[in-house]
Amino acid sequence: MYVKIDITDNGIGISEEHQGTIFKRFYREDTVHDAEGIGIGLYLAREIITLQGGYILVSSEPGKGSTFSVRFLRK
């Protein structure tokens, strides 16, 4: 059984074709190069979550924001 935490934003969203790559180190979608950041945050989040025995998923639609679902094994 897992504990689930959902984090939802109202940002620009992530296209379906890029959802599989957003967790790569230093990845930045072409549409956000004017925003601050270097593309390390989601990579580090996934690494830490994985080390704790969990996983992270994303559900998003451009123009409508994103939901990140984090799941940890319940002990």
Image: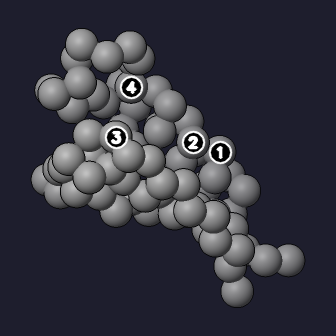
Amino acid type at circle 1 is Ile
Label 4 to label 1, Cα distance in Å? Answer: 16 Å
- The residue wearing badge 1 is 48
Q: Is the Cβ of the residue at disc 3 closer than 8 Å to that at disc 2?
A: no
User: Is any part of residue 72 visible from this angle?
Assistant: yes
Residue 45 percent location from the top left of the image: 57, 42
Amino acid type at circle 4 is Gly
Residue 16 percent location from the top left of the image: 17, 57
Label 3 to label 2, Cα distance in Å? Answer: 18 Å
Q: Is the Cβ of the residue at disc 3 closer than 8 Å to that at disc 1?
A: no
| Vertical comparison of 11 with 65: above or below | above
Label 3 to label 4, Cα distance in Å? Answer: 16 Å
Residue 7 percent location from the top left of the image: 54, 55
What label does residue 3 carry, if any?
none
- The residue wearing badge 3 is 11
Amino acid type at circle 3 is Gly
User: Is any part of residue 21 visible from this angle?
Assistant: no
- The residue wearing badge 4 is 39
- The residue wearing badge 2 is 45
Amino acid type at circle 2 is Ala
Q: Is the Cβ of the residue at disc 4 closer than 8 Å to that at disc 1?
A: no
Q: Which residue lies furthest to the bottom in this view?
A: 1
Q: Which of the marked residues, 4 or 2, is nearer the chain's N terminus?
A: 4
